[in-house]
């Protein structure tokens, strides 16, 4: 039952990201990169951070190196490449969630952070997955707010709208 919940969140995550990227694609380059009062400095910086965060957590979950060295790392310098990477990462998240079982959700993830690479961390898997999806929602909210400062209307990203769309 819980595994299916996380599969739903994975599909919702991809849906919301697609809608957000569709809106961002309507921006001119200047608006897209404009410095704004947000933690990662711009819409582009925020979208890169979302991808970096997902790669870090999926790397930990799958036991592979993420290739990310900083939370503010610009992984892709243009929206087209970033969007392609986002689509691939969302597919990766959906595939990971598809493999989850309720038995898996009784496990604890052991990992290290970028900030404290020598310190062992341990977090129950359901809380890690909750963080993964909550982190996405949190920073998508930042990008959504930044979009509202432009001429491009931000899309509705509410989970309930996804559930209605998905049937």
Image (cartoon, rainbow, N blue to C red):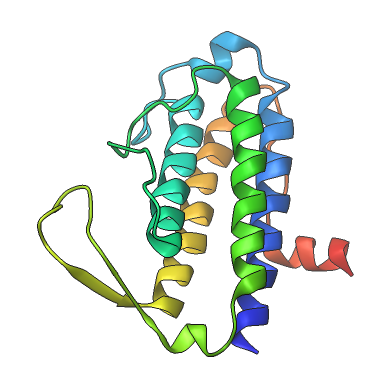
Question: Residue most toward the front?
Answer: 64
**Direction from residue 59 to residue 8 in the image, left or right:** right
Vertical position of residue 104 compared to residue 137: above or below: below
Residue 116 visible somewhere in the drawing: yes
Residue displayed at 53% across by 38% down: 143
**Direction from residue 14 to residue 74 in the image, left or right:** left
Residue displayed at 36% across by 32% down: 40
Residue 150 visible somewhere in the drawing: no
Residue displayed at 41% across by 56% down: 57
Q: Nearer the viewer, residue 121 or 25?
A: 121
Residue 31 placement: quadrant: top right
Number of numbered discs on residues: 0
Residue displayed at 63% across by 72% down: 99
The image shows residue 100 at horizontal and vertical percentages of 59, 76
The image shows residue 14 at horizontal and vertical percentages of 68, 52
Vertical position of residue 79 compared to residue 104: above or below: above
Q: Nearer the viewer, residue 121 or 152?
A: 121
Q: Quadrant of the N terminus?
A: bottom right
The image shows residue 139 at horizontal and vertical percentages of 47, 47
């Amino acid at each position: 039952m819980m595994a299916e919940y996380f599969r739903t969140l994975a599909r919702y995550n991809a849906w919301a990201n697609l809608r957000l990227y569709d809106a961002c694609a309507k921006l001119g380059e200047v608006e897209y990169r404009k410095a704004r009062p947000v933690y990662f400095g711009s819409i582009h910086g925020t979208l890169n951070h979302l991808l970096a965060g997902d790669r870090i957590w999926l790397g930990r979950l799958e036991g592979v190196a993420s290739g990310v060295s900083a939370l503010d790392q610009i992984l892709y310098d243009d929206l087209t490449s970033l969007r392609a990477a986002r689509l691939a990462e969302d597919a990766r998240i959906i595939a990971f969630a598809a493999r989850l079982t309720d038995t898996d959700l009784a496990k604890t993830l052991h990992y290290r952070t970028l900030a404290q690479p020598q310190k062992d961390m341990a977090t129950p898997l359901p809380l890690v997955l909750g963080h993964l999806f909550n982190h996405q929602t949190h920073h998508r909210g930042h990008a959504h707010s930044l979009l509202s400062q432009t001429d491009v209307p931000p899309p509705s990203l509410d989970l309930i709208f996804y559930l209605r769309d998905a049937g």
